[in-house]
Every structure is written in structure tokens, then in C-alpha cells.
Amino acid sequence: MTELATGGVALDPLDVRLGRVLAARCGEPHAETIGRTATLIGSERARGHACIVLSEWAGKPLPWEADGGPRLPDLATWKRSLQECHLVGDGDVPTPLVLDGERCYLYRYWVAEREVAAALRARLDSSDPLPLSDGLRRIYERAFPHARSGEPDFQAVAAGAALARRVVLISGGPGTGKTTVVARILALWRTADPDMRVALAAPTGKAAQRLTEAVHAEFDRLASASGPDGGLADLNATTIHRLLGASPGPRGFRYDEEEPLPVDAVVVDEASMVDLSLFHALIRALPWGARLVLLGDRHQLASVETGFVFGDVCEAAAAAAPHGARSRSFAEYIAGLGGPHLQAGDRVGALADSFAELTVNYRFGRDSGIGRLAEAVKSGDSDAAIGVLTEAGARDLMWLPMDAGEDVGPRLPVATLEKILRAKSPEEALRLLSSTRILCALRGGPRGVDGLNVRLERLLGLVSRTEVWYAGRPVLVTANDHHLGLYNGDVGVCFYEGGRPFVWFPGTGGVRHVTPSLLPAHETAWAMTVHKAQGSEFDHVILVLPRAGHPLATRELLYTGITRARRLLEVVGDEAAIRAAVETRHRRASGLAARLSDEDGAS
């Protein structure tokens, strides 16, 4: 086999080794093709793809090959080589690679995708509507008093779906009322079954905390209108890892199909951040009769790890619901509940009934620059995006059209960040830190996280200090530590107590501290990547974009960065960079949506 790591593209040594080992084991005449295929799959998996689609790569050079190097075979030759190698199978027995139509997987990801699809399909096809009662109708009508006024209220539809279906997907951007719907769903569930055991979860500790706070705030409003909440205010969200009982042992999680979660329903917020492997673990641990509600924004960035389960399932559901139609039985159930009248179709399946997209934004009004920019980016309209940025009068949006080579230092909010260094308590430091955040598309380079963190420490006068753990240092956890209860994405701040530094993190009911030497992998977080900011929102966001055409600057990244801002957004980047990002979609290779579609079924 020829050298793989050429052409200037960095490859994980494990992917290179996998290709070499499989090439040697396969032998001639297919060794070269098998080795390159395995390395390509591994390389693409590192970029979030669950598989490779052969037709998209056939006849093309590989990214690590030098210019003019060999190309992959044509599609027919490539498939024949894979089919004739004993290391490639169809999944019936374990093999390193699995060929499924034109998709080729590493075996573990093929199994995960197939089992997730089968589990979702089985639950989707098993209708389990909760009985309608006068009490349930009364709570529903109080929660959605205008459900039958004008256009269909899809918050009301989503809540009705949670009563009628075992799996529900609710997609919407910040400010569309997802957590409001969750609180009302919980109240409805508790009305229908006072003994229902419900778990709330999110991918990160920060997202779990936000879910708890938002849902409790809505509980307070519901209680004033509907009386006692039936114990709902005692519900607190946790991370998915904690919910599943993550452990370092061979099983990975305490709960699985052999020991299911002791719950009747699970609600997962920020579901777009859940990767294929974690979702696979969750669905395996979910009891057969339990309900599952997934909330997220299908237009956001996908998970950091492999797969985009929420986006794939929403894509299949949106395709299954042409013009918003629902099945007749579902439309009749919603009408019987007191909900909106829905368009019904004879050939609409369960997947359409289980999906609701929230489009009315209650945070950003018509004049909001943030809201209009997010909509323009989401729709892929670069002209409209530039138009919003250049308009005068938007009080919540600023554009700093700086060329990629210009120094962004003078534009950074140094005076605001200095307040964190002067904070009188860890609570004050965390509050100030959570109000303003610099977000980057990249890690490296002068406009990446690493470069800006160094630049900010200089601007803040911190480079002359000898201590690493200075008071006010923001810290981002980058690895999970189940014993400490810290997870990738958690953000804390250094603050001294008794003359010793501790890193303080927000928690349910207050703050808690950890000795710096005990922290899992971490980094300074004056600036952080947009990926790491998923699940969080800030009053003021400075979004720093790279040069035009950078492969990481995509529509999904730009949209996600924009929607982290609640009150003020500053966009740093020239017009070419913004247009290129808006016009570049990142689609992850996966077969999940096809497996869930009516045409492909659960194959």
C-alpha cells in the first residue's frame, strides 16, 4: 500500500494504521482499495460523518493525496472490490467494514445507526395516546387558550403530540418557546397520570441548568393560573451521562436494555448536540413503554462527535409531513383535546405526527436585527443577511466588516471583561462571565480561540503574572469527569478563598468549587468556539469569523453563533466571509433519515 499521509492533510495515526492493517489482512488484488476506504471512513468519522457515500467519492482524489496522485476507483469497481473482500460485510456478522447500499461504515457505527432507527421506528409505529378526560382538556385549554385562533399554534400541537405519541420531536430557534412547551407537557402528563416518573436531561451541565431554570420559571406561571403543580417544581434536569449512570467500566453506563431507566418519560433538551453513540446508549436504556421528547434546533451545528441524530430524524419527519399535514387519527385526537384544527391526509405516517416545528419567535420582534439576521442565514439568503447587517437602526446588532488580516484587538470588550477580574465573589464573577462571550469559528490562528485568549490576557495585563490560576480566569472543561460531576463544555471561574485558588462552577441551588489540580482537561475561556457555546446563551456576543471560504465557516456555524446572543450581537468579518458562510451547508453523511422514511423503512 502506498503512503497514506501525504498531501499536507493531517490524519489521525489510528486511521492511518487501520487502513494499513486492513489492507494487509485483505491482500491482493483489493488491498489498496480497502486500505484507502478504511482510512477515508475513519477520517470522515472524525469530521462527524457516520459513513461515507461511495457515489460522492468515486473517481475523486483523496484529501491526503498529493496533487496528481491516484484517485479512488469508479463506483462499480469500488463496490466490487469491497464486496469481494472478506473484511467487508453486510452486517449479518461482525466485520471491520459494512457496505449498506452505497454507504460504507465502520461496524460499530452501522450497528448504532441501525439500532437507533429500529428503536425509533418501533416506538413511532406504536401509538399510545393518553385517554382524554375533562381534567386533561381543562389544563390543555388553560395552557393554550388561543389554540384554535387563526393559524395553528404549533406549541399546542407539540404538547398534544406528547400526549398522543411515544416519540416527539420539537424543533425551534431560541425564543420560540420550547421550554414553555416542555413545562406544559409536564403539567399535562402529571394530570393524565399523577404517578408518571419523568426525567429531564441535556447533553451538558450548562444546558441542564438552563433547562431546570426555564422550566421552573414556567411552572411558577402555570401554578398561578392552574393551582398546585403536583410536585413538578421538584424536577431538576441532569446531563444525559449522569442520567444513564456513566461509569468507567466495560458497560460504559449503568442503564441499558438489561437494566432500563426507572422512568415513564424522558425529555432531552439541546438534542442537536447529542451524537450517535450517546443517543444509541439513551435509546437502549429507555423502557419500551416510556415516552421520549426531544427538543432542539435542527438548523444549528451538529454534535461535536459522530452523527446528527436530531437533524436526521427531523429531516425525515419534515419530508413525511408535506404542507404540514398530519394523519387523520392524530388530527382527530388533537381536535378532541381542544387543540387546533389540522390538515389531515390519508397517507401521512406516524413520523409526521411526531414532529412540530416552532416558528413564531417571542424574543425577537420584527425590528430585531438578531432575529432577522438569523432568519436570513437559516434560509441561505446571503443578500438578505448582508442587507440586515448594513441597515441602520438595529439596536441589537453591529457589524464590524474587518478584513481577515486586520487586528481585532481594539474591538474586543476589554473594559467589560476587566469587571470579571474585579468581582467580589465567585457568584458575581460567574454572572459577569455568562453575560458576555467572544465566540470563534476556529481554534487556531489570530482569529481563533487560542490566539484571542493570548491576546486578551495581554490586553488585560495578565501576561506579567507568574501564577496560572489568577482570580477571574475563566475555565472551560474539555473532558468528562463523572466522579467530579464535570462535563465537556462546563464553564467555571477561578476565585480565591482563604488565600487558595479554586475553580467555581454554577450548580443547582448555588455554586460549587473544585481544586484546580483535580480538574479534568481544561483551557482558558476568554474566547471559546461556537461549538462549545452550544446549549448556552449570552446577553452580548462578539462573533469572530475567519477568512472567506474556510471549510469550518458554514451556514450552521454562523446561525448557531448568531442565536447565542440575547440582547446584542457584534459580527466581526468581511462581506465575503459572511456570504461564503451563508452559502455553505455542512451535511453529515448518514443513513438514518433514509432508514426512517416510509420508502426505506427500518432496513
Image (spheres, rainbow, N blue to C red):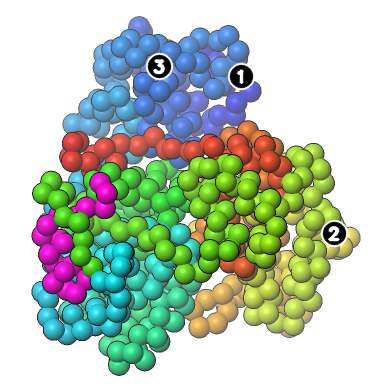
Using the image, determine if residue 103 lies above or below residue 67. Answer: below
Tell which residue pokes out farthest to the front in this image. 150
Q: Residue at x 34, y 14 (%)?
A: 75
Which residue in the structure is indicated by mark 2?
459
Q: Main secondary structure of the magenta part?
A: helix
State the quadrant of the C terminus: top left
Of 392 and 124, which appears nearest the observer?
392
Q: How many marks?
A: 3
- The image shows residue 397 at horizontal and vertical percentages of 66, 60
Q: Residue at x 52, y 76 (%)?
A: 507
Mark 2–mark 3 distance (CA, rounded to whole Å): 50 Å
Using the image, determine if residue 292 lies above or below residue 48. Answer: below
Q: Is residue 228 left or right of residue 417?
A: left
- The image shows residue 565 at horizontal and vertical percentages of 59, 62
Using the image, determine if residue 182 lies above or below residue 38. Answer: below
For marks 1 and 2, the one nearer the N-term is: 1
Within the magenta stretch, is there residue 103?
no
Q: Amino acid at mark 2?
A: Leu
For numbered disc 1, what is the local secondary structure?
Answer: loop
- The answer to whether marks 1 and 3 mark residues whose Cβ atoms lie closer than 8 Å is no
Q: Which mark is residue 58?
A: 3
Mark 1–mark 2 distance (CA, rounded to whole Å): 38 Å
Image depth: mark 1 or mark 3 in front:
3
Q: Which mark is residue 7?
A: 1
User: Magenta part of the protein: which range?
Assistant: 322-339
For numbered disc 2, what is the local secondary structure?
Answer: helix
